[in-house]
């Protein structure tokens, strides 16, 4: 997938989570978490700019998602109290969840391509469902449109319910 497709997948997969948070009366958490997930949706492609790190290698794995979650959760825990957060533990868990979720949406977008992703790197093979190529304009923009549509639907539903 290209950047547009990854943004679409992240919006599409996050939409039900955002809906649940909005219905639970947590609009700020829903928006901040959603923005974080979309922002992190392309993080695994940092390997394209790292010398010696193969594309769709370690950064396209569940261990990398766990590393990002741990780093963001730890940073949030350290920063939450000095910034005056009421519940630093909640902030840390939220940051960790957003980190893992964002990276995993990227993996989901790439697993549908023939190249797949090495989910359990450094052991095991790459996994692929092979639905489309990464450079498919139809799939990349189609996923983006679906993601934006799902996000808009969440906004409409919660505006009517709340």
Image (cartoon, helix red, strand yellow):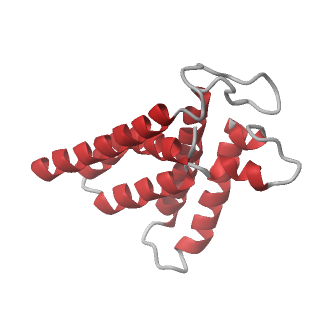
Q: Is residue 10 at all visible to an observer of this figure?
A: yes
- The image shows residue 34 at horizontal and vertical percentages of 41, 53
Residue drawn where x is 59% and y is 45% of the image: 103
- The image shows residue 158 at horizontal and vertical percentages of 18, 49
Left-right relation of 125 to 112:
right
Residue at the far right in the pictured view? 52
Work out whether residue 134 or residue 59 is closer to the camera in this orientation and state it. Answer: 134
Work out whether residue 4 or residue 80 is closer to the camera in this orientation and state it. Answer: 4
Left-right relation of 85 to 158:
right
Reply above or below: 114 against 40.
Answer: above
Residue drawn where x is 81% and y is 54% of the image: 50
- Res 75 → quadrant: bottom right
Reply above or below: 4 against 28.
Answer: above
- The image shows residue 42 at horizontal and vertical percentages of 59, 50
Residue drawn where x is 82% and y is 33% of the image: 122
Left-right relation of 14 to 75:
left
- The image shows residue 138 at horizontal and vertical percentages of 45, 32
Left-right relation of 151 to 43:
left
Q: Is residue 20 at all visible to an observer of this figure?
A: no
Reply above or below: 28 against 102.
Answer: below
Work out whether residue 110 or residue 104 is closer to the camera in this orientation and state it. Answer: 110
Residue at the far front in the pictured view? 137
Q: How many marks?
A: 0
Residue drawn where x is 35% and y is 55% of the image: 30
- Res 149 → quadrant: top left
Q: Quadrant of the N terminus?
A: top right
């Amino acid at each position: 997938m290209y950047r547009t497709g990854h943004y679409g997948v992240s919006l599409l997969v996050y939409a039900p989570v955002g809906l649940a948070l909005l219905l639970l009366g947590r609009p700020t958490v829903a928006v901040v978490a959603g923005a974080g997930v979309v922002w992190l949706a392309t993080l695994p492609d940092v390997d394209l700019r790292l010398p010696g790190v193969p594309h769709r290698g370690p950064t396209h794995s569940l261990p990398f998602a766990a590393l990002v979650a741990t780093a963001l959760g730890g940073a949030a825990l350290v920063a939450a109290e000095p910034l005056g957060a009421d519940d630093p533990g909640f902030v840390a868990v939220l940051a960790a969840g957003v980190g893992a979720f964002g990276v995993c949406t990227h993996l989901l977008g790439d697993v549908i391509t023939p190249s797949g992703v090495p989910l359990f790197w450094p052991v095991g093979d790459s996994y692929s469902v092979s639905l489309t190529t990464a450079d498919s304009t139809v799939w990349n923009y189609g996923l983006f449109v679906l993601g934006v549509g799902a996000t808009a639907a969440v906004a409409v539903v919660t505006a009517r319910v709340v």
